[in-house]
Amino acid sequence: MLARTRISRRALIQRSAMAAAGTAVAGLAATTSLPSAMATGQWNPVHQGIEEATIADMQAAMEAGTITSRQLVGIYLERIAAYDLSGPMLCSVLHTNAGAALRAAEELDNERVATGPRGPLHGIPVLLKDNIDVVGMPNTGGSVALANNYPLQDATVAAKLRDAGAVIIGKTNLSEWANFRGAQSSSGWSGLGRQTKNPYYLSHNPCGSSSGSGTAISANLAAVALGTETDGSIVCPSNNTGLVGIKPTVGLTSRAGVIPISHTQDTVGPMARTVADAAAVLGALTGVDPRDPATAASAEHAQSDYLQYLDADALAGARIGVPRTGGYWGYSPEADAICNAAIEKMRELGAEIIDPADIPTAAEIATSPAEFTVLLYEFEPDLNAYLATMPGDVPTRTLADLIAFNIAHAGVELPYFGQELFEQAHGIGSLTDAAYLEALETSLRLSRTDGIDAVMDEYDLDALVAPTGSPAWPTDVVNGDHFLGASSSPAAMAGYPLVTLPAGDSFGLPVGLTFMGRAWSEPTLIALAYAFEQATKHRRSPEFLPTRELP
């Protein structure tokens, strides 16, 4: 019964998307002035003129009257039907609300004519990770247990996107419960949406937990998307799917209405095909929110316009450090080669490279249990607080309820891996326990004052750089992820920002470069990433190839 509900839900998405979009956009690709990228794939590509179009391209076309927001929404709904629900079947989009999206787009088109656009996101179609509350669509965390969780209020970030004029067209698949359920998970798998695929090689993994957001935007199924990160969940899928991802400082964007893991480390940020697009979205998300006390700290730091920091010459004179120890390099020769070449390119562009510039606590960060202890302690109270906000007809109201639900529906929820993290977190203790308080102090000290801040002070750095991760691995639901390494943990523990962007590819698979810095340093990181992007242009469209053929 549960599996049938999931299948019929996906079929309903497909029918509603095709019906709503078909007449609105018939023949539009032949007349649109949006830039056309490569003709990709072998599954009857839809509206190739939209591929790799930027927010600025879309705004220019709407201002010129070449296209409307309603038509853009229709194009993306058609692409979701053609690429996600059929053809390569990317499994990146869990829900759409075609009728509401088309109505909202039409209203925004009328507003543009009457009073002009609200800003850079006016009429722009966006997708949100399915752990972010959006009125009119369920918020599930990928779990069948929350299939009927229809929020009564938008998450603050969703409301801010609407206020900025963005059109929310759907919700994306994710690693179930943001990859905080089982010890042997396959990133991108959820009980509700099953396995998200990588659009470069369908056999390979998109990484998680914001896997659907990564795949969908890389495949040009919307302009931009939101992801969430506790440790790596924005930057890793951005790495694997060839995107720009911004993991903001904790507190810069609100987590109100977002299914949580940890109030210490959770943050919400944009995933996009260009630095400019990601910056445009970030500016719409910021601001103090009474629903999330952590945002109070952003009052003196938040910006409403990060586009002003796009500077193609920002690397000239910048001091960039390279943390060589601690496991941020050396796990992937392919990633090392690509990112070492990126460092040389930055040197050519005028950056002063300090190599090595090691994080003093890197070895302790790699071996300390502090971060995991913090996550285990914070998960149950934070999750239970969210579950208490759900409509009354959703039966799972606590972590204990979810554990029991998964056991009762193991065929749907536990076919490949278990719920060991749920079980470890359940009943671990109180946030007043000495073990938690000590772990929290240790995690923050190692990552902040004795870690990132220390190395940046010592060498007077503007940023640190390292590979974001390895090229994507083949998906393996039996054995779980073949994860080699990453550079996200110091900033995750500290609550500090990261910006990743494409730096090259290996065997046709993207590899990203991460810029990391102090708290609230998003303007600097965005400027540096933009300068590198403009000088290199490594982003390329995926081709939806079935697998990597061996020579």
Image (cartoon, rainbow, N blue to C red):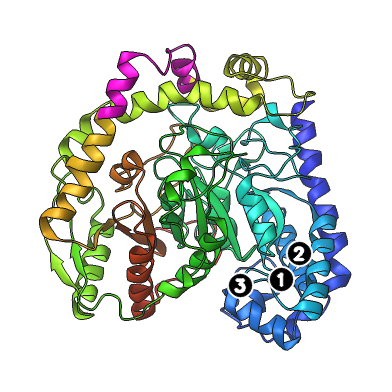
Q: Which residue is mark 1?
A: 46
- Can you tell which quarter of the image residue 349 is in? bottom left
Q: Secondary structure at mark 2?
A: helix
* Residue shown at 56% from the left, 35% from the top: 176
Residue 313 vertical placement versus 332 (above, below):
below
Q: Which residue is mark 3?
A: 120
Residue 401 vertical placement versus 482 (above, below):
above
Q: Is residue 100 left or right of residue 351?
A: right
Give me the C-alpha separation between circle 3 and circle 2.
24 Å
The crowd level at tag 1 (other Cα within 10 Å; few <14, some 14-19, many 20+) is some
Q: Position of residue 46 (x, y in %)?
A: 71, 71
Residue 201 highlighted magenta (yes or no): no
Q: Amino acid at mark 1?
A: Val
Quadrant placement of the C terminus: bottom left
* Residue shown at 18% from the left, 55% from the top: 456
Q: Nearer the viewer, mark 3 or mark 2?
A: 3
Magenta part mainly helix, strand or loop? helix
The numbered disc on residue 78 is: 2
Q: Amino acid at mark 2?
A: Glu
